[in-house]
Amino acid sequence: MLFRSQVTIDGPTTIGDGCEIRSGVRITASQLEDRVTVLDHSVIINSQIGSDASVGPFAHFRGDVTLLAQAKVGNFVEMKKTVLGRRSKAMHLSYLGDAQVGANVNIGAGTITCNYDGVRKQQTVIADNAFIGSDTQLIAPVEVGANAYVGTGTTVRENVPAGALAVSAGRQRTIEDWVAKKGRTKP
């Protein structure tokens, strides 16, 4: 087990064999199985991390998070009440709340689960082997089926069947000379 400087462990926490915990990490009331890597400045609260999983840097697990074996969570990913399946990954700049994510799922950069409807929290379910493109918003309650793809920049408001492709972005529109016509050029 390797601990770097300024690591804080609070509450009833267990850490398995062969784990690496980097600088600035805080772990509270959580269980880490064997060979887990937690990179710099990550916060893990009331969560379970499976064997051979990796977290961070700068990840934040706000509670009730479960990473199954070999899952990977990267830079600036926040999670709450979420299960991330075996070998699934969410590597950058994402929020997953009230979500059930299957095995071998890729969560693209900038993906968010929109889990609060103003009154109560709703759940997002993503089945095994799905691919969620970057900058996707999943408006809960919603399900993405097994082997489905969600295109980059999509807002998912309806269930996506297994093996389907969901896209919501329209064609790009370019307005020539718009800056000059609006007088927005810089001196």
Image: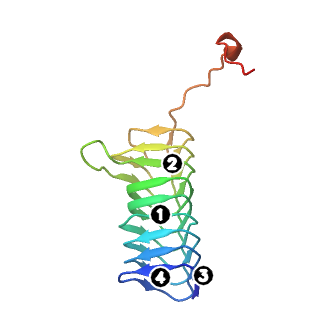
State if disc 4 and disc 2 touch (CB < 8 Å).
Answer: no
* In front of the other: 117 or 139: 117
Counting other residues with Cα less than 10 Å from the Cα at mark 4, is it few (<14), some (14-19), or many (20 or more)? some
Rounded to the nearest whole Å, what is the CA distance between mark 4 and mark 3? 18 Å
Where does residue 6 sit, x and y in percent of width and height? 55, 78
* In front of the other: 31 or 23: 23
**Vertical comparison of 142 with 44: above or below:** above
Residue at the location (45% across, 61% down)? 102
As helix, strand or loop, the secondary structure at mark 4 comes to: loop
Where does residue 162 sit, x and y in percent of width and height? 45, 49
**Vertical comparison of 73 with 157: above or below:** below
Q: Where does label 3 land, which residue?
A: 4
Whichever of labels 4 and 3 marks the residue nearer the N terminus, that label is: 3
Whichever of labels 1 and 4 marks the residue nearer the N terminus, that label is: 4
Counting other residues with Cα less than 10 Å from the Cα at mark 1, is it few (<14), some (14-19), or many (20 or more)? many
- As shown in the figure, which amino acid type bears the numbered disc 2? Thr
Q: Where does label 1 land, which residue?
A: 60
Q: Where does label 2 land, which residue?
A: 111
Relative horizontal placement of residue 2, taking residue 78 as reference (left or right): right
Where does residue 67 sit, x and y in percent of width and height? 46, 69
Residue at the location (67% across, 18% down)? 184
Q: Where does label 4 land, which residue?
A: 33
Rounded to the nearest whole Å, what is the CA distance between mark 1 and mark 4? 18 Å
Whichever of labels 3 and 2 marks the residue nearer the N terminus, that label is: 3
